Amino acid sequence: MEETVVTQRPNGTSSTPSKTTTPIPHDPHAAPPFEAHDVQRILDFYWTNAKDPHTIRRKEILKKYPKVTKLCGHEPLTKYISFCVVMLQLSLAYYLRNTSPLSFKFLALAYGIGGFCNQNCFLCIHELSHNLGFKKPLHNKLFSIFVNIPIGIPYSASFLPYHQLHHKFLGDETYDTDLPTKFEAMFLSSVLGKAFFATFQIFFYALRPMFITQIKFTYIHLLNVIAQFFVDYLMIKFWGPKSVLYFVLSSFFAGSLHPTAGHFVSEHYIFKPPKNYHAFVDTPPIETYSYYGLLNLVTWNVVL
């Protein structure tokens, strides 16, 4: 018996990932061991005996470019770059403290600078969750709380355990909370539904994990909440609520229809699904695409 990774729902090939890992026979033509009432569930997914596409792609890269292993490990420059990004966002929040949130200047800066900066913060927290900023895990966790400041709401401490589950249980419908739910697949598979998902995916990304599985609340979570709300309180008291609104709006733009949000598409979505989606496929559809453009300068080469 091997594990099969379900890679994508056929009716959501460009924006609705699939979501389960189930034992199946070695025979690629044998029917999965499901009851009759599970037939529709079977037809909803691509089934394969191969490992997940991330593993396959990693092996291909290492085989073709073995020197890439020299680039693995923590990057000392991360903390300096991130510090500058956080300071830039704090400076803009102060600058906009008396500016109407509906004004062109406020919206333009939130989208044109804040969106890039906060996506940088999101992805820096991702890098830190893999302990790539410092050698010691605790230092990565604490610095994540600092990088969290421009996001406006406590996020970094929860991201770490959920993201670890994503890597450990890739494709599992219970623990991989990066995968959209069946509700999302059913109601957001149309063009309008996908447009809605792409526009507001930051909310799906933030709220979905809490509805899927629970994680243990630790002192790092408490520290993240206290630090973030303390900074927000100081900003509101001395600069006004518009400064905090700038942070929140920047976060929304960063995870919405924004150039830097394109990495979600590069990392997780399928563009060329198998024609016979209800059959077993020998090789999982590729759902990770490389990007070599200028946006890598602000996204930590996340889709390189």
Image (cartoon, grey):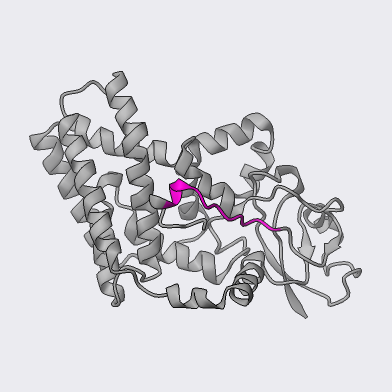
| Identity of the residue drawn at 28% across and 39% down | 247
Residue 246 shows up from this direction: yes
Residue 206 shows up from this direction: no
| Identity of the residue drawn at 37% across and 32% down | 111
> Residue 159's image quarter?
bottom left
Q: Tell me if residue 142 comes above or below residue 106 in the rendering.
A: below
Viewport quadrant of the N terminus: bottom right
Relative side of 149 to 178, left or right: left
Q: Where is residue 284 in the image (x, y as percent from the top left)?
A: 74, 63
Q: Position of residue 272 (x, y in %)?
A: 75, 49
Relative side of 172 to 88, left or right: right
Q: Tell me if residue 157 comes above or below residue 134 in the rendering.
A: above
Magenta part, dominant SS: loop
| Identity of the residue drawn at 84% across and 63% down | 280
> Residue 58's image quarter?
bottom right
> Residue 95's image quarter?
top left
| Identity of the residue drawn at 32% across and 37% down | 113
Identity of the residue furthest to the right in this view:
29
Q: Tell me if residue 57 comes above or below residue 232 in the rendering.
A: below
Relative side of 16 to 126, left or right: right
Extent of the magenta region: 286-296
Judging depth in this view, the residue of 143 and 43 nearest the camera is: 143
Judging depth in this view, the residue of 7 and 53 nearest the camera is: 53
Q: Position of residue 184 (x, y in %)?
A: 62, 43
Residue 287 within the segment the image draws in magenta: yes
Residue 273 within the segment the image draws in magenta: no
Identity of the residue furthest to the left in this view:
238
**Number of marks in the image?**
0
